[in-house]
Image: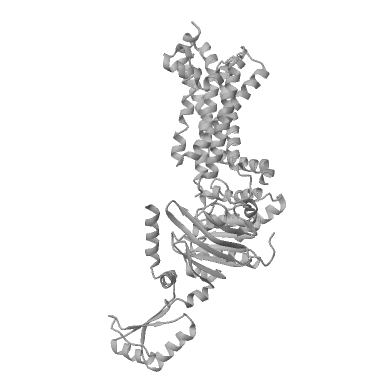
Amino acid sequence: MTDASSPAITAIDVRKSFGDNVVLDGLDLAVEQGSVFALLGPNGAGKTTMVRILATLLEADHGTIRVAGHDVRREADAVRDAIGVTGQFSAVDGLLTGRENLALMADLHHLSRAPARESIDQLLEQFELADAADRVAMTYSGGMRRRLDLAMTLIGAPQVIFLDEPTTGLDPRSRRTVWEMVESLVDDGTTVFLTTQYLEEADKLADRVAILDRGRLVAEGSAQELKQRIPGGRIDVHFADAEAQLVAGDALGMPVTDQGSPSLQIPTDGNVATLRRVLRDLDEAGIDVVDLAIHTPDLDDVFFALTGRDAHVAESRTEEELYR
Amino acid sequence: MTSTYALHDSTTMLRRDLRHLQRYPGLSLFPILMPVLFLLLFVYVFGGTLGNGITAGGGRGAYINFLTPGMLLFTVAGAAQITAISVAKDMTEGIVARFKTMSIWRPAVLAGHVFSSLVLTLISLAVTIAVALLIGYHAAAGPLRWLAALGVLVLLAVALIWLSVALGLVAKSVETASNIPMFLTFLPFLGSGFVPVASMPAGLRWFAANQPFTPVTNIVRSLIANEHVGSAGVKAIVWCLAITAASYLWARYLYNRRPVQ
């Protein structure tokens, strides 16, 4: 057992290569107990490899890694006793019903009958699978499969949960269920390690966010801290004509450049006060706004700001490296 | 540490695999019906002629008594073939990765496949024997010799099932897994199962006399025909144990090494 103050996950100088392809290149991270940690990065950044190493599915070439107080290499079984994993690929048994899948997990966790049945019923309810509980999982939709997958991960109340892109490809309703689940887990003191391609998701769920690029962490902090380092947020205001554009530039104290259409891009960190000030200044100057849009920074902006490269370029290049 | 749960985890996996057999009858009925069809084909289509070659004027009656032990080996081989398919199918699904992140007895996943295939083999054997008796097979042996024959068949089944597990793990896809173990169902034909080895041409005769199915066929035949078993028994058992040991080690190596989806 771990004492309350030690981190749930520590990783020091983790390295992993497949042949000549360096996937993880000296990664350090620490995750506090009872917190949500998000590893953010484009496809091919090494997120899944890191999850596999932490979940004892893959051995690192180098590095010291402890999960729930145990060394992943020497005490793999103790680590496995403490974790739950939902990978990117569906890990449910298609020929078993939802209930049987959960019962299989309960059996493998060596739970006794009565408490197992109780927690199975509760999970079926929580994941909105009660109606489909006695149908084979093969007949489930993608979202239902993923929800069952997550419910299976929760059997046995693991201390640390790994979710590898838990909402990729999900419909909005299933995505919301996943988010609610993560929030309720944290209330119970569980540690959650998730990977995602969506800044929004990391922002909503995570206490700490780390950005992974080509096997290295390029930034780490709270979502708020990271977003402050990004100049990507802006308000786009469109006007009726060039004259209105000129007056508006004057009122807001911004240089006006010819961009083909009469509009202005006002940088913002996304807070409401800035928006209110912009609207008030335009109103006082008597300018009609034709259209207004708020552009919030996304992964592309974060990525570009931190690495100077576009996320999609990084992605294709990494894949190229993989196939070489 | 996790080996304390070896039996518990293996039976959990066995329950899972038996449910698969039950819910996927297309796969599990094949090894039960196939030997019955072959038995009927060989007895009623070829049997009249072949029987005369075994005992002069023996006809169909002589052939069914010669054929049945060989048919039982064919049954065992056919059922083992299914194991490769279910193992390969399992490996392409994420659930095995999930099992690997859980603190369970590691070989339990494979043990579940072996035991469920063994159950399927026993059902197939029971059906084949019942049909053989129905269409005129005369078993001279008493229950003890039948039990011994069954013991030898189980020994062979365990060997072929483990081999099939390894072949299922080595296959890159379910399609390959269903093709690779096909040779298992051919081997009984190239032995003493369907016609006497002595009737084959020289090269084939040498192969037939020295391949593992022949001593196993001979010992099963001697046991249930109430004949003297002799040294063939030792040879058969050594073959079975050797195949089991080598296949188990190969399968375990492949399972632990194989990257997960």
Q: Position of residue B177 (x, y in %)?
A: 47, 37
Q: How is the image coloured?
A: one colour
Residue B228 left/right relative to B185: right
Residue B175, visible in the rendered structure: yes
Position above or below: B88 against A10: above
Q: Is residue B161 above or below residue A269?
A: above
- Indicate the position of residue A245 as horizontal and vertical percent values: 32, 87
A140 relative to A309 in the view: left or right:
right
- In terms of depth relative to the viewer, which is nearer, A115 or B148? B148
Is B13 left, or right, of A229 in this rendering? right
The spot of residue B70 in percent (x, y) is: 53, 20
Residue at 61% across, 59% down: A66
Asked if A209 appears above or below B162 in the picture, the reply is below
> What residue lies at 46% left-to-right and 16% top-to-bottom?
B206
- Between residues A218 and A85, which one lies in front from this camera angle? A218
Image mark count: 0
Q: Residue at x 69, y 55 (%)?
A: A118
Please state the horizontal and vertical placement of residue B83, each as a whole percent of the image: 53, 36
